[in-house]
Image (cartoon, helix red, strand yellow):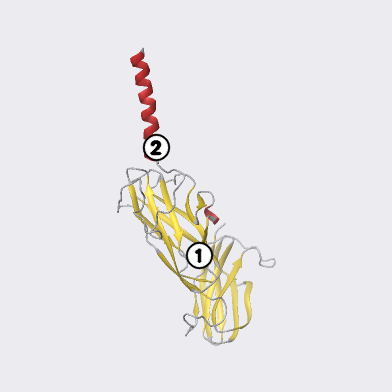
């Protein structure tokens, strides 16, 4: 009888230890990115088969809040994943990823182990640029389970520019219309463009049939970099459905059109 009780206790303790080993930090840990120059995750071994990447705009404006995505991948692994996301100058917020991310010490980490049942996980978060122009950096480190290990993610460099007028870092020498971000989107997106001189500018959105949906800009603007938001809920009676739309920038003799996609 005593032997059976001892075996039962040992089995129970072994289950507890195994559970701890699988996910040492199921609710996340911070201070493990290259921002802090640490040795990475202290409870895992490094594994270069694990990768982490960012996607999002390369250029933002001072004080602008933009949505970025991160993806962690480990081919063939269904273990839970973890992340630590940090920035040098800006501010991070779980934003659209609040269901699985949380803020801690100015950084972002998972609320619970991320689901990598398909071998990867992609999530989103919000980044708010600092008040002064310059260059900022996003850092990422990722871990998968316990035995699978951890790795540094690919860092992302972000150019922060002033919103209106001549940019202190690099005054535009030509016209440029950027791809909106995010894209696809719902309900809002941001369109950035550059003009090399002061002039009258129009920025309009059209549906796939060529019908004008809304006018975002129809005014005289100063030379420089500009950013305007488009929200499908503010189109003055024009109902926006899922599908392809186009936005056209006209300034002087310059005209350019790009495609964007609304997903509901």
Query: Which callout, 2 or 1, points at the residue further toward the start of the chain?
Result: 2
Q: Residues within 10 Å of mark 1 (few under 14, many from 20)?
A: many
Is label 2 in a helix, a strand or a loop? helix
Indicate the position of residue 150 as horizontal and vertical percent values: 34, 50
Kindly report the distance in space between the C-alpha atoms of the residues bearing marks 2 and 1: 34 Å
Q: Can you say whether 225 is above or below 107 in the image? A: below
Q: Residue at x 44, y 52 (%)?
A: 30
Q: Residue at x 41, y 65 (%)?
A: 156
Whether the residues at callouts 2 and 1 have beta carbons within 8 Å, the answer is no
Indicate the position of residue 200 as horizontal and vertical percent values: 61, 85
Q: Residue under circle 2?
A: 20
Indicate the position of residue 70 as horizontal and vertical percent values: 44, 57
Where is the C terminus found, in terms of image quarters?
bottom right
Image mark for residue 29: none
Farthest residue in the right direction? 237
Farthest residue in the top direction? 1
Name the foreground residue: 264 vs 128: 128
Where is the N terminus found, in terms of image quarters?
top left
Q: Can you say whether 15 is above or below 176 in the image? A: above
Q: Is residue 251 visible?
A: yes
Q: Residue at x 44, y 56 (%)?
A: 85
Q: Can you say whether 234 is above or below 141 in the image? A: below
Is label 1 in a helix, a strand or a loop? loop
Indicate the position of residue 136 as horizontal and vertical percent values: 45, 68
Q: Residue under circle 1?
A: 90
Q: Is residue 75 visible?
A: no
Image quadrant in which you'd find residue 7: top left
């Amino acid at each position: 009888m005593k032997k059976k009780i001892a075996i039962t206790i040992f089995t129970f303790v072994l289950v507890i230890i195994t559970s701890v080993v699988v996910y040492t930090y199921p609710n996340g840990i911070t201070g493990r990115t290259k921002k802090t120059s640490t040795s990475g995750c202290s409870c895992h071994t490094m594994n270069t088969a694990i990768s982490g990447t960012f996607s999002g705009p390369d250029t933002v404006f001072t004080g602008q809040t933009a949505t970025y995505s991160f993806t962690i991948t480990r081919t063939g692994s269904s273990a839970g994943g973890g992340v630590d996301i940090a920035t040098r100058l800006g501010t991070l917020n779980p934003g659209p990823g609040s269901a699985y991310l949380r803020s801690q010490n100015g950084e972002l980490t998972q609320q619970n182990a991320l689901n990598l049942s398909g071998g990867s996980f992609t999530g989103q978060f919000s980044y708010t640029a600092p008040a002064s122009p310059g260059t900022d950096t996003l850092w990422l480190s990722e871990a998968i389970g316990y035995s699978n290990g951890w790795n540094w993610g690919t860092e992302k460099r972000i150019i922060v520019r002033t919103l209106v007028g001549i940019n202190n870092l690099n005054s535009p020498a030509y016209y440029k219309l950027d791809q909106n971000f995010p894209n696809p989107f719902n309900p809002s997106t941001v369109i950035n463009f550059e003009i090399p001189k002061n002039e009258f500018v129009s920025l309009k959105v059209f549906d796939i049939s060529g019908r004008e949906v809304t006018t975002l800009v129809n005014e005289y603007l100063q030379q420089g970099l500009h950013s305007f938001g488009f929200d499908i809920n503010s189109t003055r009676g024009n109902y926006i459905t899922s599908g392809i739309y186009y936005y056209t920038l006209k300034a002087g003799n310059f005209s350019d059109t790009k495609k964007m996609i609304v997903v509901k």
